[in-house]
Image (cartoon, rainbow, N blue to C red):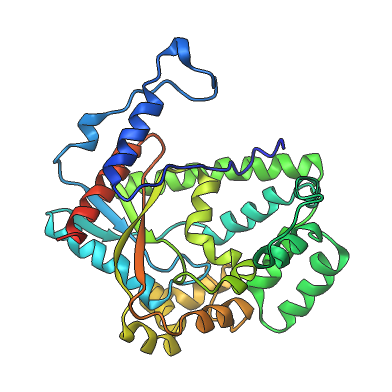
Amino acid sequence: AGQAGVIAAFGPMSPEVSAIAECMAALTTIPTSQRHDATVAPVPWNWGEYSSTRKLKIGYYVADGFIAATPACARAVHEACHMLRQRGYEVVPFRPPMVIQALHLFIKLLTADGGKSAAEHLEDEVIDDSLRAFVQGVRASGSLWKRQLLPRLMRRKGKHRTADLLEAQGTCSSSQLWTAQAHRIHLITLWEQAVQAAGIDVFVTPAHVMLPPPPHVIASSGITLCYTQIFNVLDFPAGTVPVGHATAQDEEDMPSWPRQALDDAFGSELHELIQQGLVYGEQDDAVERLVRDSSCGIAGLPTAVQCVALPWKEETCLRVMRELQADTAR
């Protein structure tokens, strides 16, 4: 309670994107006299934008610098981009700014009380085995072992991603919390400027690093949600839509992951970006091993993409999702 740095987002779910648009329209067109939440701006739903046929500029990426999407998830993005090109849209690569820093901020803001709030909410609750490791980790965030000793050990072994995430956890002073919240506003502005400078209306990203893992590894795979978590930090409207299925070739390409994905995304700049702390190179850490293990036997599983727009552009985001759904159904 009281955590306002990363707002929980409860979005509608439906087999049809059009139903989500109807839901959003209903939620945003409630008469002022019947509104019970003063924090929701009374911005009417723009059916004209949702139904528009104007040509859009689409950005995309399949490697965010934190951890690259697996071949199956990356291919879904490329298939979606092909569909949008077929509609006459301009589709361009987009390099997301400061993703690593944003995800460290995500962890810092969520654990700023040292996990106290989470522990209180879960008191006397029965914890499902699939979440037990996650809950234990949150409760222990900021301990001497997890925030100082273990990160040093991980860094000596070259596991910089794990070390950085551990150091980001733990109790903050009021001053540190305010600084983190100011950093969040700076990141929002940075992203908005980058998207506007590129002239992008909507960008398409992987919905996840990998396809759904077995239940017993869910608690250990939280940071692979990075492609969606960042938009909780930025508070950008986003939604996922199914596009295609995993293939046997996706499995065969896994031995070269993430090295090949990083080379493809960042090219000759990769080494310099790693040195600047803007990209994590191949780590061979527990996360990468988990992703590799969970990417066996995936042929035939559905894949999806995430569509994202700037704040207050939900109609444009849902328009692209609707068009992808229609093209996929053909």
Give left or right: position of 13 versus 157.
left
Q: Nearer the viewer, residue 198 or 237?
A: 237
- Residue name at image x 30 percent, y 72 percent: 245
Q: Quadrant of the C terminus?
A: bottom left
Residue closest to the far right: 144
Residue that lies at the very extreme toward the top in this rendered image = 33
Q: Quadrant of the N terminus?
A: top right
Classify 321 as above or below 242: above
Residue 55 lies, with reference to residue 4, above or below; the image says below
Q: Is residue 260 visible?
A: yes
Q: Quadrant of residue 20?
A: top left
The percent position of residue 259, horizontal first and vertical second, equals 45, 83
Q: How many labels sit on residues?
A: 0
Image quadrant in which you'd find residue 290:
bottom right
Left or right, residue 212 beside residue 139:
left
Front one among 205 and 131 = 131
Q: Residue at x 75, y 63 (%)?
A: 137
Q: Position of residue 326 (x, y in %)?
A: 19, 53
Residue 278, compared with residue 16, is above or below; it is: below
Question: Could you tell me residue 193's position as x and y percent?
Answer: 41, 44
Q: Is residue 260 left or right of residue 140?
A: left
Q: Residue at x 69, y 39 (%)?
A: 3
Q: Is residue 200 visible?
A: no
Toward the viewer: 101 or 115? 115
Camera-side residue of 285 and 280: 285
Residue name at image x 42 percent, y 76 percent: 70
